[in-house]
Amino acid sequence: MVALDVLRSLCKRRGFVFQASEIYGGFESTWDFGPLGVELKRRIADAWWRDMVVSREDIVGIDSAILQSPKVWDTSGHVSGFNDPLVDCKTCQGRFRADQLQESACPRKPSKHPGEHGDCDLTEPRQFNMMFKTRVGPVEDSAAIAYLRPETAQGIFTNFLNVQQSMRLKLPFGIAQIGKSFRNEIVTGNFFFRTREFEQMEMEYFCRPEQAADLYGYWIKERLNWYHSIGISPDNLRAEEHAEKDLAHYAAACTDIEYRYPWGWGELEGIANRTDFDLNAHAQATGKKLQWMDPQTNEWITPHVVEPAAGLTRTVLVALMDAYDDETLEDGSERNVLRFHPRIAPVTLAVFPLVKKEGMPEKAREILKRYLDRFPCLYDAGGAIGRRYRRQDEIGTPFCATVDGQTLEDGTVTLRDRDTMKQDRVKIEALGDHIDEASRR
Amino acid sequence: MVALDVLRSLCKRRGFVFQASEIYGGFESTWDFGPLGVELKRRIADAWWRDMVVSREDIVGIDSAILQSPKVWDTSGHVSGFNDPLVDCKTCQGRFRADQLQESACPRKPSKHPGEHGDCDLTEPRQFNMMFKTRVGPVEDSAAIAYLRPETAQGIFTNFLNVQQSMRLKLPFGIAQIGKSFRNEIVTGNFFFRTREFEQMEMEYFCRPEQAADLYGYWIKERLNWYHSIGISPDNLRAEEHAEKDLAHYAAACTDIEYRYPWGWGELEGIANRTDFDLNAHAQATGKKLQWMDPQTNEWITPHVVEPAAGLTRTVLVALMDAYDDETLEDGSERNVLRFHPRIAPVTLAVFPLVKKEGMPEKAREILKRYLDRFPCLYDAGGAIGRRYRRQDEIGTPFCATVDGQTLEDGTVTLRDRDTMKQDRVKIEALGDHIDEASRR
């Protein structure tokens, strides 16, 4: 399991993730995605969108605003109930979550028995609301209070009727969304595991009440399989059902898909049976009929909802952790490899001219141009081929194609596989299918 | 030119754009993208990303956080200078921008001479800062003030060194970003032309000082061509250079790409020569050397910057306006058409089974599955074929393929073109290339 500081250093050095506002000393555990990080995040988001929206007839997407009417958060329970219990330590001035004391060591004056906070003198917990507040409108005293949304889900519930009607959807159907959410967390950290600004991939699957239990099971399996399909090792994933006493007020059941982080098992995605809690609450608050009429029986149904709610930024972190490898080769040399699945690698194919002459750069660029609409490609002409391979290994490129003298004669390139390090001669026009096939394995 | 209320009604009815928090009466001119709107926005963003990042060796992408250190906005000049002059009307209680009085009619008590505000009794203008403020951290009194970014550009400047070094970039090179920005506008409106939450597509192109003037001209042409490439009519686009007195404090020159909106010409994208203003300012504030060393001469250069800054949400609005058409056919019937370019249409190919039997639905779904990784596809089996064509016309689908009895015999479908309304028999395996070719026209 990769150490966090090793991963963080690799991420900075190779352009995956930088500390936000780093030249100003950073800011409150926020992070920027660099050139390779943004491509990795885009590919993960695209894979989710393809599998959850584009390839399914029963699910459509939306993109709702971050700023919504504050009444939405009154109804959803976030204004009154989205709190964490905050305690201050009078000795060290640290701030902790009262319900997670065992996980956070006192930062200034660590207890001799880590986790016990033996040296700390803690206040009684008080409730701290985690929504960021701002004011909208031109004059501060008369402006409307608004919150940065703490989840994308409510933007789906408030659009239930508009989406169902405009798309003529019949139960069961889903509405999916990818977007940023904000939570003013008391404790952040573990690189970008817990941050105050993050991106979610949420889907609300609306169904008849009697289908909800089965669909809850279906979505747990589907979502686990999806993580396998983007290459996350099954050994590092597990599904853990919440005990009844730990359920949120809106949920009849909830299962976390957990990942084995360097610090132990932790949440990656939550799949909840939210019942009809949200639609009922919004219907009551607005007087709107948030229901669906069965055209066969003319019966009005308030759908129940199963929600697979994933973290996009957190999946990027998991993809990096899971891909990281550090291996000693037969000749005794070491190499760092990110073993990304070809579906999500920021670069799928790197193309090298063996030398910068004899038309090889031109031929390499032709290959790039031919394939860049099919998967992300990169051109690298710098240094010895061996060094170029190592550079691509370190950023997780699964395939490298080298254009050499033979290429100009017979139209084949040397295709080198990142994991096996084996090399094959492949026709240029067969590269795409070869890579697609290897990606399906 | 389409009337705004007609477009707004179409957008709601067919699932492009909904008023945010509509069931609560809406909120402060914010908008949600529905199932077709989100696909249109994704395709425009993907086209920009492909043309500005993926297909170019000299430009890389990033994705920086919305919440950055407040020092970033001190340095950029936004804390002190990102103000609009606000005036109140004592008669009607309206609020206006003092510099745009001629554009905004008094909402409650319109002047007899529109634009003159003859009936209004206006206060002296006062400066109103347009950044949204919030507080980050667990206790309000000790929390750090933070701003929602008013532009994505500063996240590029603060990452200049990290990006240049991790990607080993040589001048000239660009850093591109797509993301949300927030401005507490005094006056919003014209559907989603001016909103407080919006999405930008910005690119900073770093170059030697002596290259900046030429590159400024280059990017104006490139960006105009790009709008043509996604199908925006050249007749509705023009490039307007700012007069020297209207330039922002950081710019040596600026040209707006303007669109002919229903209310007149207005900004769509700005291309600015930002000189070395931003890198210099951040270097001075942080003591970091935000420069690039020419490896040939060992000379340190502070790059100048040309910035094409486009609005993604605004491009979505322009795409909808420009595509809208309402035509009377030869038989006297009317049809609504959105003439989206196939590159950005939310659905490129709709597949219909002629009837819901004899294996036609299965064959139609086979076609869908075959092509959905190549372009967005949709299955529709409801109602007469003519009605299905009209539904697809109204959402801008350029091609409809119908599976009929002959399909099961010879593997061809009827391919119907949205604009010419002509029908051809095309082999299923040739559909993709046929559509790609038509898309290049």
Image (cartoon, coloured by chain):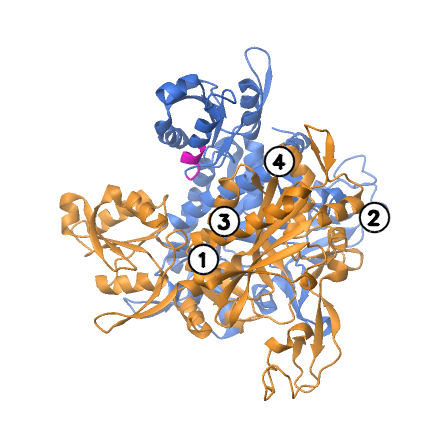
Chain colours: A blue, B orange
The kind of residue on which mark 4 rests is Gly
Q: Secondary structure at mark 3?
A: helix
Q: Are marks 2 and 4 on the same chain?
A: yes
Report if residue A313 lies within the magenta region: no
Report if residue A369 lies within the magenta region: yes
- Decide: is A249 above or below A401: below
The kind of residue on which mark 1 rests is Val
Q: N-terminal of the two: label 2 or label 4?
A: 4
Location of residue A422 in the rendering, given as x and y in whole percent from the top left corner: 45, 18
Q: N-terminal of the two: label 4 or label 1?
A: 4
Location of residue B375 in the rendering, given as x and y in whole percent from the top left corner: 37, 47
The kind of residue on which mark 3 rests is Trp
Q: Which residue is mark 4?
A: A15
Residue B48 is marked as 3
Residue A93 is marked as 2
Residue at the top extreme, as displayed: A331
Q: Are marks 3 and 1 on the same chain?
A: no
* Spatial CA span between label 2 and label 1: 43 Å
* Location of the N terminus of chain A (image quadrant): top right
Do the numbered discs 2 and 4 sit on residues whose CB atoms are within 8 Å? no
Instruction: Specify few, some or many for label 1: CA neighbours under 10 Å numbering under 14, 14-19, or 20 or more.
Output: many
* Spatial CA span between label 3 and label 2: 48 Å
Q: Chain of mark 2?
A: A
Q: Secondary structure at mark 1?
A: strand
